[in-house]
Image: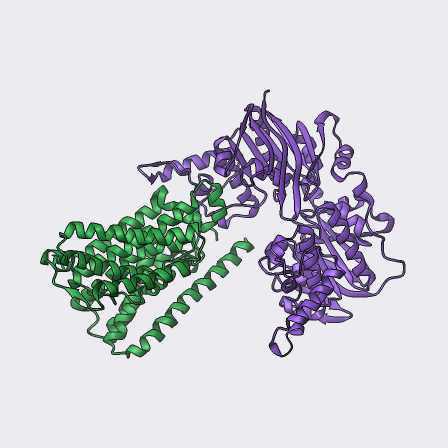
Amino acid sequence: MENKISFGAKLKKVMAVRELFMIILIIIAVLLLTIMSPNFLTRANLVSVLIGLVPNGIIAVGMVMCLLEGSFDLSVGGIMAFTGTLVGVLMLKGVAILPAVLITLAVGLLIGLVNGFFIAKVHVHPLIVTYGMQRITRSAATILTGGYSIYGFDAAFGVMGSKRIGPLPLMVWFMLALIIVFDVLFRKTKYYRQAYYLGSNPNAALLSGIKVDSYRIQTYAFSGLCATVAGVVLASRIMAGTPTAGDGLEMQVLAAGVIGGCSMNGGEGTIIGCFLGVIFLSLISNALTIMSVSQYWQGVVTGVILIAAVSIDMILKQRRAQAAVKK
Amino acid sequence: MSELLKMEGITKKFPGTLALSDVSISLNSGEILALMGENGAGKSTLMKVLSGIHSKDAGRIIIDGNEVHFNGPLDAQAMGIAIVNQELSIFPHMSVAENIMANRQPASGGFIKSQQLNAEAQKYLDELGVAISPRTKAGTLSTSVQQLVEIARAISMNPRILIMDEPTSSLSDKEINTLFTILLALKRKGLGIIYISHKIKEVLTLADHITVLRDGKNSGELDRAEADEHSIVKLMVGRESHFIFPHKAPEGVTKTVLSVRGLQSGEKVKDVSFDVTAGKILGVFGLMGAGRTETARTIYGLEGKYSGTIEMNGRMLNIRTPRDAIQAGIAYLPEDRKLDGLFLGMPVKDNIVAGILDKVAPGGMMKESLIARNANEMVEKFQVKVPSIATRVSSLSGGNQQKVLIAKYYKTNPQVLFIDEPTRGIDVGAKSEIHKQLRELADSGKAVVVISSELIEVMGLSDEIVVMCEGRVTGKVSGSDMTERNIMTLATKFIDSSAQEAS
């Protein structure tokens, strides 16, 4: 009896690893979509899905760090729009590409530091600080450009979208590399592991010698930096700075993180898990588009999926907790 | 042996209470100092000062003859002070190894060396004789094993002074023996150990010196050679505070209100039957893990499904939620006032009316005059010392917080009032006031059930005592049968026999 593990038990074990669960979910979604629409499994469609999710994928890295600490960053969409236009304005003012990008990254980092300062040192709730920052940055993007999109950059800046390696543009490879590198860093390095300690039990983390306040500030700075990278990459791809870019993106990424196994209470989740969540949500939205589901209905579908996914997770967790008690 | 640590004249104030007043202790290396005292005597507070969690208001901490100042727990750790807290501070989502080596994982270039991490953790687990894999998720372990993981964490810091705050409260006999072996080995290595406990037998086996605190002050020091149960108890309870319990219920009070038969729920409540009489105080006593609190929680609808019967005035109840229990006339004051009982950030008046919102909001609109009238009435009845009913509960002393909580539940007009650890963390003066108020509630016809781990309190307060062990009622004592010896025999009924079977 004890040597033989039943199929059901094995399945449970597999499902307990969130990433595998997500991959299975994505495979099911792909199969269904292929059956339902002949246009889905075409190279053009898949490449366009991948290109479309690049900003979300990059921002997911920073968001996961916030989620691990039991927090979130609602300013990422605004920061992306602001920095995406800032880099363009700088270049149009005659700053060379590399310095323009570096200045923009520094500004994004600074915005994140400001978020972190108010959250960790002044103890303002992250919801308020990051929502406020979202309003500020989006406004700033509009002010910067007078409300219009700006374009006319040096063609060399467009490398992220124009240069292809194999079937995919550079930006997709760049994002994938970022995801993989940071997934490993979050699993393996002492620095990023602190996020798990902090989210798991903040009081104990403090007593274990983790510099909680300073780490929180660094977390938001990191998230701001990720959003800035996304902004620059997006600007490079569309060769324009758009103040309305990434509207509502913060909630999409947050939802992807939670679907991908991050706990809103912190301490749980991985970069890959969140990224798989991003892929899943992109597939759903792509499916709705190619099946010509009305724009009006797309919100209903994604909303239902979000609540359903998290509900299933909670139910499974409670079952597991009960099973553990019985042992 | 040299003097490793000296704390002199330590004073610590909290809003509304003087937690420590001019307390001094001294510890040599290679020595175990037991710090004893009743709940609320100031043991934990003193250790939180020593481990840098609380700042002191006055006094000196001297290590190796030099005065030190701690601005936080890290400073204390740097001086070689490690503490195993009474409340667990486990990272549930992380592995045992990551718990033990929290923030000190072996790494090169920032990358954690998993193998070395697990090997190091394994070393400390082996040292403690804990047979678990360092890769296990800490959240899946039982509380007692989690505690061993915490002890492993403390030892892994290679401390010079190790503080153990009631480490045996959730351990089995075998685990306690293992722990003692380890502590004695650490002592031989030259560590100074401060061992907090209120279990006299443990202390007499383990300690070289005993310092007893009472009401935040030094009550006395004893060498093990001169210490015995009697001398320790005398220092712990003090002469005067021992005999000021209120009167008992008059003869001839026999009306049963609540009747519990064969109650069973989860792992902690296996077979519990008892009757609660109107006008009397029933004590429920048991050692840690006996299922006292869980029994009350089951009756209050907090533990989900149960089997067995709960009858109120002869009518069978089906309690699924606390709301059902309240409607049936049962109130339960939880053990952890701050966590489960009070709305700390809210004013006294809002706390008092929290259970009777329907009454103070006729037609759905809260009426400030009704709230104030109810709150003032209760503040007067239970003698809550507050500047105003608009004062936030968080700024009150433990005793006054408990009174607010009693007032809140009193307002729901219960027939049976369960109160779990009624005077935990409350200073002596307020303790006897609360005892008096509980007796007045009984005299006014309520049935009061006092759940407590303090034997002296249960005996002083109750008319009858139901004793539990391992989830079962092992007996009931009253009148002249109500002796410490009888009660302890019943409370350890299954524990002793299982120990004998094992040996």
Q: Residue at 69% across / 63% down in the picture?
A: B409
Judge whether B221 appears above or below B329 on screen. above
What is the quadrant of the N terminus of chain B in the image? top right
Q: Residue furthest right?
A: B251
Seen from the viewer's position, the closer of residues B198 and B121 is B198
Q: Is residue A123 visible?
A: yes
Q: Colour of chain B?
A: purple
Q: In the rendered image, what is the letter of the chain coloured green?
A: A
Judge whether B499 appears above or below A32 on screen. above
**Percent coordinates x, y for residue B265 in the rendering:** 64, 60
| Residue B286 horizontal side relative to residue B59, left or right | right
Seen from the viewer's position, the closer of residues B165 and B294 is B165
Q: Residue at 18% across / 52% down in the picture?
A: A100
What is the quadrant of the C terminus of chain B in the image? top right
**Percent coordinates x, y for residue B8 in the rendering:** 63, 30
Q: Is residue B503 visible?
A: no
**Percent coordinates x, y for residue B444 in the rendering:** 82, 63
Q: Residue at 27% across / 69% down in the picture?
A: A31
Q: How many marks?
A: 0
Judge whether A260 appears above or below B64 on screen. below
Seen from the viewer's position, the closer of residues B337 and B302 is B337
Q: Residue B420, located in which quarter of the rendered image?
A: bottom right
Q: Residue A18, located in which quarter of the rendered image?
A: bottom left
**Percent coordinates x, y for residue A166 in the rendering:** 13, 57
